[in-house]
Amino acid sequence: MSTNYLHDHLGPGLLEEVAPGVFSYVQPDGTWFINNTGFIVGKSGVVSIDTTSTELRNRAYIDAIASVTPNPVTLLVNTHHHADHTHGNYLFPDAAIISHTSCRDVMMATGIPDYRSAFPSVEWGNLQFRAPDLTFEGSTKIHLDEVEIELFDLGFVAHTEGDILAWLPDQGVLFTGDLIFHGGTPFALFGSVEGTLAALNVIETKGAEVIVPGHGPAFSGSEIQEVLTSQRVYLEFVQETAAQGVRSGRTPIEQALATDLGEFEHLTDSERLAGNLHVAYRENSEATYDWVGFETAIADMIILNGGQLPHCVA
Ligand SMILES: [Zn+2]
C-alpha cells in the first residue's frame, strides 16, 4: 500500500513500507532531478537515505516521513554528491550527515551547483549549502536500535568517485543510489562506464530481496535479475558504440548522432548517451581521445536531444 504526496503540478512521491520500518520514497517519473529517497524508523530516531532536489520536494519528503513517525531524522546518508540527492541536507538540522570522503570533497569544492542555464524552469527554492559532518571510506555500520544498516563503498569510481550503498542485511533491503536508474538511462558522465558496470556485480552479490534505486521504481524478487541485466546491456552497448566510434574516427557526438538507440529508445533521458560516450571513449584503450570537460559533454547531450534542453519536471 503506497501513499501519494501530491504537490500541485509537481507530481506524487510514493511512500511504501518495503520491509517493517523501512520505507522507500519513489518520485515519478525518475527523470532529471526526480530522485528517490528512503528512511528507516527506529524507536526514537530516523535514518534517511538521501534528500531530494528542490526545497518544495524536500518539504514534501519531510511531510511523508512525519506521516509515519513523530521521530526526528537523526542521521542522514548521502549516497553521492549529486544535487538531487543532497540539496535537502540543510532541511535536516537535527541530523548528522554521513557520506564517502570523496563525496564531501566534491561538495566542498562545488557548493550549490548553478543549474539555471541548463534547467531554467526549475524552482529550486531557498537552498542553503550543508556538507556532510562525517565521512568514511570502505564500510561502516549504523545501529538504529535493533536495525543494522551497513554503509559501504565500491573501492572504485562508478556513478561518481564517492558512491556508497546502504544495506540492511536482516531486512534484505539495498539502497543503491544512482548506481541504478530503473527505467531510465544510466548516467556515467561524472564517473565511469566500466565502474558502473562493475558496481552491478557488487549489487548482485548482496542477494537483496528489495532494491531501492536512485531513480525509478523499487523492485524485488525476480525483477532484480531483469533490472540488473537491462542496466548491464545498456552499459555494454555504450562501450561497444564507443569502440565503433573510435574505429571509424568519429567524435563522441558524431557517433551518438549516428547511433540507433534501438531497444534502449524507451529509456528516459536518452540524450545521456552523448555524455556516456565521452566517458567510454576515455576508457577505451584504442582511443586517442582528450577529455573535453563536463560542459562540452553536456552541450553534446543537448545536441543529441535535438537542441532541446533536457526534459526536467523538478
Ligand atoms: Zn547521481
Image (cartoon, grey):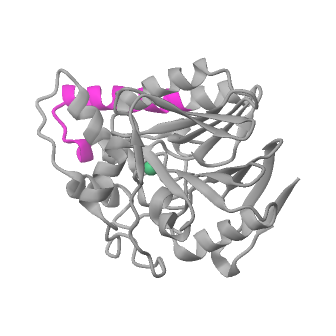
**Residues in magenta?**
231-254
Q: In the picture shown, does residue 95 fall above or below 122?
A: above
Quarter holding the C terminus? bottom right
Q: In the picture shown, does residue 126 fall above or below 258?
A: below
**Residue 150, quarter of the rendered image:** top right
Is any atom of residue 214 visible in this view? Answer: yes
Say which residue appears at 70% left-offset and 43% top-offset: 218
Looking at the picture, how far across and down is residue 217, in whole percent? Answer: 68, 47
Q: Which secondary structure type mostly characterizes the magenta part of the structure? A: helix
278 to the left or right of 97 = left
132 to the left or right of 202 = left
30 to the left or right of 296 = right
Say which residue appears at 42% left-offset and 63% top-offset: 310
Q: In the picture shown, does residue 43 fall above or below 13?
A: above
Looking at the picture, how far across and down is residue 164, in whole percent? Answer: 47, 38
Q: Is residue 244 magenta?
A: yes
Looking at the picture, how far across and down is residue 130, in whole percent? Answer: 41, 65
Looking at the picture, how far across and down is residue 22, in whole percent? Answer: 75, 45
Say which residue appears at 19% left-offset and 21% top-offset: 285
Q: Is residue 105 magenta?
A: no
